[in-house]
Image: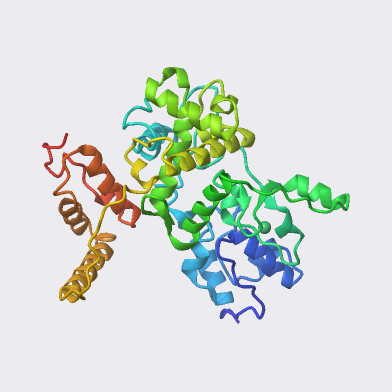
């Protein structure tokens, strides 16, 4: 009989857990290997399970897993990196020929500390260097674990631990360590010795986890969509990796303050520029540390973030606002307007014309190209495909400065 049967035991997926972690926990409850679970126990599937299931597993496997376990298909997808397109990256498959354009769009089109365009241009496709495979995809595989999680009875791993996006486990507030080192220590019967993640890195990690769990990140200046947060962080990591000598005097001072606050040598000791993804982990950690220090300095008003996304980092100057003492008679009209806007946004996610109209409406008051791009980034951040959003020129906005 081929009709799908529900597996009797299936642990609930954790909030940021990876598919491979959840499959391992499920297989363990049956004393099976993940391979056996996926080959002999998933029905008559015509597809083979890939070696790395957390990347982009075949839809048929996810559908069969949802059927066997009663887990929500959308939730299973979010346990893979493919489920994070387009929030985390525009595409999973950056090819050689569009690597430069992807880099320039994702990383250099936005700016955080520097005025737009100040980051300059760098070639990501350099002969003799590994191929750049897109934002956040490390050239060398990261297999990191939390020591405390690993020592537990039913250990889980977060999907994002595979990417150079976080330093620690937010549940236990400790640094992630190399999986092999943890395994070797276990063989030697050593007790776990978790190293706490200190400020300012702890705040940086908290922002990222907030984004992963809620889809939004509460920054000191404003709340941004997680898609905007990933781009902001990646641009910031790029800015702190740039050579001080080639910067303007103002940018140089900003970078000096950041590296001083991080207590590390300038550029974390990086001599020759390369994309963040192609650095080794200790250097990536140095860059994350500098990015975290920059966020703190900007929040405290000790540096000014002059980039297109910079205003999100610092609280807005206090303005006196009349509190009002009467309930507004317009409240229903306002609620109605909100509901209409939400409906338009939902439609724009699948309808090109609505997306175009929405962008045109939102940018009526924009005077500069940067403001226009910011609105574009906002719409993209709330789930409207980049391909649906026309450029300023395509919208006939020749007036923008
Ligand atoms: Zn942990």
Q: Position of residue 268 (x, y in %)?
A: 58, 28
101 w.r.t. 152: above or below? above
Pick the front one: 96 or 168:
168
Pick the front one: 38 or 157:
157
60 left or right of 35 in image: left
Name the residue at 55% across, 25% down.
Answer: 266
Q: Position of residue 288 (x, y in %)?
A: 55, 39
Pick the front one: 237 or 30:
237
Looking at the rendering, which quadrant does residue 12 occupy? bottom right
Looking at the rendering, which quadrant does residue 109 occupy? top left
Q: Is residue 135 visible?
A: no
- Name the residue at the right extreme: 188
400 w.r.t. 23: above or below? above
Pick the front one: 68 or 354:
354
| Picture quarter with the N terminus | bottom right
Looking at the rendering, which quadrant does residue 370 occupy? top left
113 left or right of 5 in image: left
Q: Where is residue 239 in the image (x, y as percent from the top left)?
A: 44, 32
Q: How many labels does the image show?
A: 0
Name the residue at 14% across, 45% down.
Answer: 395
109 left or right of 200 in image: left
Q: Can residue 105 be seen in this view?
A: yes
Q: Position of residue 147 (x, y in %)?
A: 73, 54
| Picture quarter with the C terminus | top left
């Amino acid at each position: 009989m081929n009709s799908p049967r529900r597996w009797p035991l299936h642990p609930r997926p954790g909030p940021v857990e990876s598919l491979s972690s959840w499959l391992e926990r499920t297989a363990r409850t049956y004393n099976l290997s993940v391979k056996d679970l996926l080959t002999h126990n998933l029905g008559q599937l015509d597809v083979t399970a890939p070696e790395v299931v957390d990347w982009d597993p075949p839809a048929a496997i996810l559908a069969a897993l949802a059927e066997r376990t009663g887990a929500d298909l959308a939730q299973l997808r979010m346990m893979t990196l493919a489920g994070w397109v387009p929030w985390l990256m525009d595409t999973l498959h950056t090819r050689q020929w569009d690597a430069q354009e992807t880099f320039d769009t994702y990383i250099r089109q936005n700016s955080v500390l520097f005025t737009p365009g100040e980051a300059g241009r760098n070639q990501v496709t350099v002969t003799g260097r590994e191929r750049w495979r897109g934002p956040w995809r490390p050239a060398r595989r990261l297999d990191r674990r939390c020591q405390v999680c690993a020592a537990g009875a039913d250990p889980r791993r977060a999907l994002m631990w595979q990417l150079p996006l976080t330093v620690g486990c937010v549940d236990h507030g400790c640094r992630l360590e190399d999986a092999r080192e943890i395994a070797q220590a276990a063989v030697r019967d050593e007790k776990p010795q978790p190293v706490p993640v200190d400020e300012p890195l702890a705040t940086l990690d908290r922002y990222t986890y907030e984004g992963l769990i809620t889809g939004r990140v509460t920054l000191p200046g404003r709340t941004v969509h997680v898609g905007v947060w990933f781009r902001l962080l990646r641009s910031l990591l790029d800015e702190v990796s740039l050579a001080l000598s080639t910067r303007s005097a103002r940018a140089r001072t900003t970078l000096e303050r950041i590296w001083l606050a991080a207590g590390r040598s300038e550029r974390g000791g990086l001599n020759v520029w390369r994309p963040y993804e192609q650095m080794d982990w200790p250097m990536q950690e140095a860059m994350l540390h500098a990015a975290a220090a920059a966020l703190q300095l900007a929040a405290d008003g000790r540096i000014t973030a002059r980039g297109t996304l910079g205003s999100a980092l610092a609280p807005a100057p206090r303005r006196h606002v009349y509190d009002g003492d009467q309930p507004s008679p317009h409240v229903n009209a306002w609620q109605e307007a909100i509901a209409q806007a939400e409906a338009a946004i939902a439609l724009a996610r699948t309808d090109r014309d609505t997306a175009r109209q929405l962008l045109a409406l939102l940018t009526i008051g924009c005077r500069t190209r940067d403001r226009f791009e910011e609105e574009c980034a906002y719409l993209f951040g709330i789930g409207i495909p980049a391909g649906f959003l026309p450029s300023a020129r395509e919208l006939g906005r020749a007036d923008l400065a």
